[in-house]
Amino acid sequence: MAYGSSILEKALLARLAKKKGVSAIVHLHGSQADVEIPSWSSSRRRWLERSFGAPHIIVALTDRMKRIVMKAIPSVRVEVLPNAVDLVSPPPALELAPPCLGFIGFLDGRKGEMDLIEALSSMGDLEWQAQIAGDGSNMEAACNKASQLGLKDRIRFLGFVSGDHKEEFFAASTSFVCLPKPRTCRYRSSKGWRLADRWLHRRLGASPSW
């Protein structure tokens, strides 16, 4: 369950599943969810309680997010499943030279893409490449910043990626970067790692731990 229209979409699917006698697990996420959820009207809360109530389960990523949901729609069942991966020991050797840093997310400033570009500019004496996947209102500014800092040939801006292009992004990345802003880092998780779970397991031997 994400903030915005996704709430309605998943609520409708949950209602359909309930009519069919099927239990559903509803994933709660969204960088503004802690603001969006408390703002729901009483009528919307009652409707969502009916939609997401038993036998369904809502999955939150942190105890804090669980408390926010329970305060808004207390009759639903909420379970916490934090995102994590098991450490691989010893770390596998990097297959690509130079290493390629991967960043994926909506580029609107919240996830720190400008901070990342600034940080990369201080690594000019090292060999590395980077690729940034995602679009958004900040994409042009990010591209311009990379050019101004002399990183145009070292950072690739891929735009929105999906399907095979997303697989190619993960396969070409030796490390993944997540730079949430301070106001969101208390509960945000790296979408890049969630999407990369399958690739990590196949290529590096890491197993997702939920």
Image: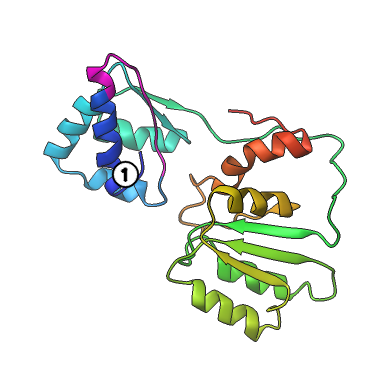
Q: Hey, which quadrant is residue 201 in on the image?
A: top right
Image: magenta residue range: 17-29
Q: Does the magenta stretch include residue 130?
A: no
Of residue 164 and residue 136, the one placed in the foreground of this image is: 164
At mark 1, the secondary structure is helix
**Eyeballing the image, is 115 above or below 85?**
below
What type is the residue that disc 1 sits on? Answer: Ser
Name the residue at 70% across, 65% down: 130
Count of picture labels: 1
Q: Hey, which quadrant is residue 100 in on the image?
A: bottom right
Q: Hey, which quadrant is residue 103 in on the image?
A: bottom right
Question: Whole-percent x and y of residue 172?
Answer: 73, 54
Q: Given the current orientation, which residue lies at the most extreme bottom position?
A: 148
Q: Given the current orientation, which residue lies at the most extreme top position?
A: 21
Question: Whole-percent x and y of residue 205?
Answer: 77, 33
Coloring scheme used: rainbow
**Eyeballing the image, is 159 above or below 40?**
below
Of residue 209 and residue 187, the one placed in the foreground of this image is: 209
The image quadrant where one finds the C terminus is top right
Left of 129 or right of it: where is 113? left
Of residue 172 and residue 77, the one placed in the foreground of this image is: 172
Name the residue at 62% across, 35% down: 84
Of residue 183 and residue 140, the one placed in the foreground of this image is: 140
Q: Count neighbours of disc 1 (C-alpha within 10 A) and say few if under 14, some if 14 to 19, many if 20 or more.
A: few
Name the residue at 64% across, 86% down: 148
Name the residue at 47% across, 53% down: 184
Q: Mark 1 points at which residue?
A: 6
